[in-house]
Image (cartoon, rainbow, N blue to C red):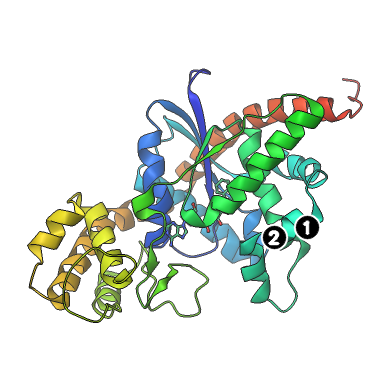
Amino acid sequence: MAADRTRILSGIQPTADSFHLGNYLGAVRQWVPLQDGHDTFYCVVDLHAITMGHEPDVLRARTRTAAAQLLAAGLDPARCSLFVQSHVPQHAELAWVLSCITGFGEASRMTQFKDKAAKQANPSVGLFTYPILQAADILLYQASAVPVGEDQRQHLELTRDLAQRFNARFGETFVVPEPYIVKETAKIVDLADPVAKMSKSADSQAGVVDILEDPASIRKKIKRAVTDTGTEIRFDPENKPGVSNLLTIAATLSGRSVAELEAAYDGKGYGALKTEVAEIVVEATAPLRERTQEWLDNPDRLDKVLAAGSARAREVAGRTLADVYDAVGFLLPRP
Ligand code: TYM
């Protein structure tokens, strides 16, 4: 991979048995075309996945399933570095250094922390420092762009602030990254509660469609999707968030434009639209389910892909961390 190609990094947590449509449309689908013309690093962020309490065996299985889904979605080990965060020790090491230049008040303002902490009896310090670890993920690779959904914008802002602060204090060390957020799919909303984003931690999964979900269940959830008052099929996220969400999902997965779908369903009613959207989702996710299972049936092959990805990641991360340690004034050990 040529060193002069722009670096891209993104990550996803192995905190569920499947990615949902929000993860897939908002992030993972954007990762695939970026493999062309960029030096791409994609990471299953298992260190982040232990910030809210977890079961060790479940985490291990979900880490493999996450990697399998990424490969099924089109990540190509020949064109990207796909790895598991805990295989690259530099993430935790850089996170420590960055935590020492992060203000306590600054970290306290992170809205995801506030939301997640409010749902926990005794939130961990790890949950509090989660965004600093995310900054380390990005800065280690000198990534110039980070493809994510809208909910990650504030974490990206913090990452930029920390990079600029470090560079100003200790000398140019980090590339300052830009968020890469595709407007149309930046916030896929919950089918049962179309003002909330689709989320794996939602209280009810009735409005969360997983890409590995069986077709009957996908159809049922989409047919029960909350639509809006009136009957008109029109893209208007403010006044018709439910219908607009269905149009976005259908347009992105079918390759048709929202305008085309609006025209096709003009006067046909919400029922017809939902039936069509359900079929589009079932059809688009079928190959993902099949290919994910193929990778899971071959764990040796999967682990080899991850080993190669992490070797490449350690190489790049190791160089950045060495520069950081030198810049902050750590005494280098004798070889
Ligand atoms: P995570 O695992 O929650 O989600 C993975 C990606 O999916 C996007 N996403 C959505 N996009 C549109 N609509 C939705 N309803 C929706 N729900 C989730 C997220 O924005 C994300 O891009 N903190 C990150 C993981 C992370 C990371 C990183 C990301 C750790 N280190 C470094 C980028 C770079 C997270 O919780 O993602």
The local secondary structure at tag 2 comes to loop
115 relative to 33, above or below = below
Residue named by callout 2: 109
What amino acid type is highlighted by mark number 2?
Arg
Q: Residue at x 40, y 35 (%)?
A: 34
Q: Residue at x 29, y 71 (%)?
A: 240
Bin the neighbour count of mark 1 within 10 Å (Cα to Cα): few under 14, some 14-19, many 20 and up: few
Disc 1 to disc 2: CB gap under 8 Å: yes
Nearest the viewer among 252 and 229 is 229
What amino acid type is highlighted by mark number 1?
Gly
Quadrant in the picture for residue 77: top left
The verdict on label 1 being within 8 Å of ligand 1 is no
Which residue is at the far front? Answer: 239
Judge from the rendering whether residue 155 lies leftward or rightward of residue 108; answer left or right.
left
Question: Could one spot residue 145 in this view of the protein?
Answer: yes
Q: Where is residue 111 shown, x and y percent of the image?
A: 62, 63
Nearest the viewer among 181 and 293 is 181
Q: Where is residue 305 shown, x and y percent of the image?
A: 49, 38
Q: Residue at x 16, y 70 (%)?
A: 273
Residue named by callout 1: 105
161 relative to 141, above or below = below
Quadrant in the picture for residue 228: bottom left
Q: Where is residue 36 shown, x and y percent of the image?
A: 37, 29
Quadrant in the picture for residue 114: bottom right
Location of the C terminus (image quadrant):
top right
Q: Residue at x 27, y 81 (%)?
A: 224
Q: Where is residue 39 shown, x and y percent of the image?
A: 48, 28
